[in-house]
Image (cartoon, rainbow, N blue to C red):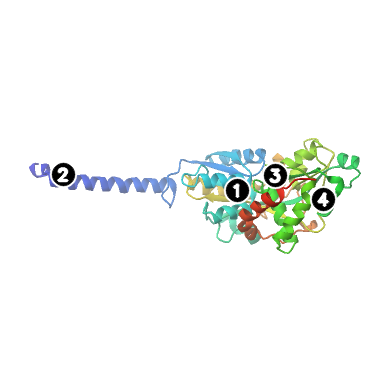
């Protein structure tokens, strides 16, 4: 036993033991967290960009079907990007689910998302997903006008049928619209103007300046204009049509939906893996699940009538028929790349301008 007491031998044994333990720990981490070796606690934290009810239904069903604990925070698109950027060194979320894909592109530009090509993404149309797998579409929503027929009748203004109609003098301070720096819905509206003006951002902002006197206020959330219209605070809310339909079903029978004849924008609601996620294995499992027909059919059960991207999912009769609405050529990637600069220009040139 004497040789083992030699200090040099003892030192080598300590180093050898430490190395063995390190390898074992590494293997354990890899097994727990997947191929990237990150630890996974068997839960997933979701930044959720749709309605509170939709987010709650999605996470609850995921947990029921997989046994993986899921929790969410409801955030608008701009808020999500800001939170992801603020927590970049220590992410608070594992997955971003819901909200227009141009916000996902903006997040990708800042290195906030991790590419993941789910095996379930194969059936999703190429127009509804990023080719590198940074985000994959889970639903489609079409921008429209949510009209309070009672308010418009009192003002003797017909329900708008075009973007030009929205500029009518009779709608002064009677249009509900969110701010595009916080709301993905409002940014979809802003980029729709870019598309309608041949990619000319200057002309798009000029339209927004002309609309400015008719906007009551720029809300934080894209859903708020439907609520404003429902309460009679405005005659028209610019919003995704499915949110207006859901508000109708809350008992607001004065609401009607119209679409602009020139063409309208649309969102591809995405799902993506957050870079540096603490629970990457559970996050990938969540993404896989979100792309299934069963997951995409949950929306209508909580009055969320977006069109599913999975062609095998059933489409609600209350969802917009994409074949009957004229859509603009909406370049999601270009919209995402331009978002930071364009929303800054909107805030400076439009939102802060005085109203006559």
In front: 271, or 282? 271
Residue that protrudes farthest toward the left in the picture: 2
**Split into 4 quadrants, where in the image is the N terminus?**
top left
Q: Are marks 3 and 2 in contact (CB under 8 Å)?
A: no
Which element carries disc 4, helix, strand or loop?
helix
Which element carries disc 3, helix, strand or loop?
loop
Q: Position of residue 32 (x, y in %)?
A: 42, 45
Within-10-Å neighbours for mark 1: few <14, some 14–19, many 20+: many
How far apart marks 3 and 4 lie (CA) works out to 18 Å
Residue beneath the point at 81% across and 40% down: 234
Q: Badge 4 is on which residue?
A: 166
From the viewer's perspective, is the residue at label 3 or at label 2 nearer?
3
Q: Badge 2 is on which residue?
A: 10
Picture layout, residue 127 above or below residue 14: below
Q: How many labels does the image show?
A: 4
Left or right of 248 in this view: 34: left
Q: Which mark is residue 290?
A: 1
Which element carries disc 2, helix, strand or loop?
helix
How far apart marks 3 and 2 lie (CA) works out to 67 Å
**Earlier sequence position, callout 1 versus callout 2:** 2
Residue beneath the point at 69% across and 48% down: 185
For the question of whether residue 125 can be seen, the reply is: no
Q: Residue 222 carries which label?
A: 3
How far apart marks 1 and 4 lie (CA) works out to 36 Å
From the viewer's perspective, is the residue at label 3 or at label 1 nearer?
3
From the viewer's perspective, is the residue at label 1 or at label 4 nearer?
4
């Amino acid at each position: 036993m004497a040789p083992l007491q030699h200090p040099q031998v003892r030192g080598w044994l300590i180093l050898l033991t430490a190395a063995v333990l390190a390898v074992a720990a590494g293997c354990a981490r890899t097994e727990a967290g997947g191929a990237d070796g990150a630890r996974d606690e068997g839960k997933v934290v979701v930044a959720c960009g749709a309605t509170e009810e939709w987010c709650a239904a999605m996470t609850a069903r995921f947990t029921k079907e997989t046994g993986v604990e899921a929790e969410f925070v409801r955030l608008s698109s701009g808020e999500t990007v800001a939170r992801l950027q603020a927590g970049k060194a220590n992410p608070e979320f594992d997955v971003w689910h819901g909200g227009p894909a141009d916000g996902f592109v903006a997040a990708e530009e800042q290195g906030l998302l991790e590419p993941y090509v789910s095996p379930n993404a194969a059936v999703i149309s190429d127009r509804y997903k990023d080719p590198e797998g940074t985000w994959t579409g889970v639903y489609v929503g079409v921008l429209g006008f949510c009209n309070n027929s009672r308010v418009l009748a009192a003002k003797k203004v017909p329900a708008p049928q075009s973007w030009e109609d929205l500029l009518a003098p009779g709608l002064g301070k009677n249009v509900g619209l969110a701010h595009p720096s916080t709301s993905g819905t409002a940014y979809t509206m802003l980029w729709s103007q870019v598309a309608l003006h041949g990619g000319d951002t200057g002309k798009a902002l000029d339209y927004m300046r002309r609309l400015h006197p008719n906007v009551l206020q720029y809300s934080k959330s894209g859903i708020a204009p439907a609520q404003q219209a429902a309460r009679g605070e405005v005659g028209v809310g610019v919003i995704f049509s499915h949110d207006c339909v859901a508000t109708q079903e809350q008992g607001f029978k004065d609401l009607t939906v119209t679409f602009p004849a020139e063409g309208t924008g649309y969102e591809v609601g995405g799902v993506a893996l957050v870079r540096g996620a603490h629970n990457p294995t559970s996050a990938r499992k969540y993404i896989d699940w979100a792309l299934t027909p069963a997951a995409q059919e949950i929306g209508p059960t909580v009055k969320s009538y977006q069109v599913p991207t999975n062609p095998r999912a059933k489409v609600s009769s209350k969802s917009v028929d994409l074949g009957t609405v004229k859509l603009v050529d909406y370049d999601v990637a270009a919209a995402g790349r331009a978002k930071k600069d364009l929303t800054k220009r909107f805030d400076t040139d439009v939102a802060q301008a005085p109203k006559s």
